[in-house]
Image: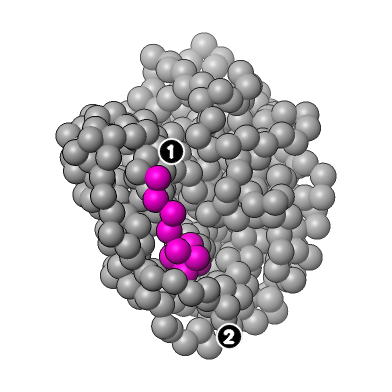
Amino acid sequence: MIIEPVTRIEGNAVIEVKDGKVYFKVIEFRGFEKFLEGRSFEYVPAITARICGICPVAHAVASARAVESAFGIDISERVEDLRRILLLAQTIQSHTLHLIFLTLPDYYNVDCFAKLPKDVVKIGVELRRIANEIVSRIAVRPIHPELVVGGVARDFDMKLDKLKSLLNDLKSKIDEFEFLRNGEVLNETTYLSLSTDGKIDFYGKTLRGFDGGIFEFKPEDYQRYLDERVESFSFTKFPHLNGKVCRVGPLARLNLTVLDTDFARDLSEPFKNVRHETLLYNYARLVEIVYCIEKILEIAENLRGGSIRMEVKPKAGVGVGVVEAPRGTLIHHYEFNERGLLVRSNLIVPTTINNPAINLDLNATYNKGGELEMIVRAYDPCLSCSTH
């Protein structure tokens, strides 16, 4: 049996059932790691932003962070705040796109979002519009954003009254999405996420993992914990954490970190203990939409000072940049020569890390007679990212 294409996801994939085993095949190949070689440092964030049209901000920010790590650059507190706003706004638009327009039709048993309740669709449209506008205010445009090494393209000065209003609208409808809390455990895995002092932070300082217990390590030490493997049936790699299948993204973040905004913290109560139900990715996505709105409003009201860009002098070095993309932990690892030209790069993206778990869950679902495509959609895979 072959399901081709897998629908309502980003990119192209095939589900094949052969001899009683299920394979999630990603058949794209793009080669970004190779053609980044020889590029000057200032162009690398712009090039990597082209990896994806849904999460370009995360690639640009991770890229800039990796360059700054290689050159020993410390950015200002204001740039940190503005980059956090960028990542949060991008997460709102990405989560909203996937949850409302691609996933909810499964729960409402309809074939497209046009048949969903109109008030729900309207909230989704408005959230994405405002989130994209926020990104544009700082990074010029929501797709192919401009981000500079050592800073950001623009400062932020935008009234957020409409965002506050949409938050209230969303709060009033939260109870209507109680069904998103349902799911069953298909497989128990390890988890990985960025955090700062145990709190959720898309621009965090420390990688936090779960392997029966919580442990932490520095982003530059990721190779001690993550190993990339390959299989013959897919162009997407198969990373493992401590030799075990790992998951990243909304489910991992809520399992591993504490939310520090009021309403989102209350909504995250089901994740006081580590949860393994795959379909809870969808509920976690809803919680993070609320969190990202609340956090943007908080940061914007308390923006710290400092220059929004600085002069950058290249030098030979190796750097690692990690951020939380909407789909999970994103790693950019670069090596530069003394002229600031990129010699080597390695990119590990969230969908790649989730790939082993997707394959495991598809096999478990097939054996239970469940809905295969719905399980894939729970992960919100970005397949163009995964085959960078």
Q: Nearer the viewer, residue 347 or 70?
A: 70
* Magenta segment includes 76: yes
Locate residue 175, reporting x and y percent. Answer: 74, 70
Q: Residue furthest top?
A: 19
Give the extent of the magenta segment: 72-82
Residue 126 can be seen, yes or no: yes
* Residue 314 place in picture, x, y as percent: 26, 45
Q: Is residue 63 left or right of residue 238?
A: left
Disc number for residue 165: 2
Give residue 157's position: percent from left, percent from top: 41, 83
Would residue 32 be found to the left or right of residue 14 on screen?
left
Residue 334 position in % (x across, y down): 34, 35
Report the residue at 63% width, 22% height from top: 242
Residue at the image position 53 percent from the left and 45 percent from the top:
328
Instruction: Work out whether mark 2 precedes mark 1 in sequence or the reverse, and give the earlier one.
Output: 2
Q: Considering only vertical position in the picture, is 45 above or below 233?
A: below
Q: Amino acid at mark 2?
A: Ser
Quadrant that contains the C terminus: top left
In this figure, which residue is indicated by the disc labeled 1? 320
Quadrant in the picture for the N terminus: top left
Left or right of residue 110: residue 215: right
Instruction: Say which residue appears at 51% left-offset and 25% top-offset.
Output: 223
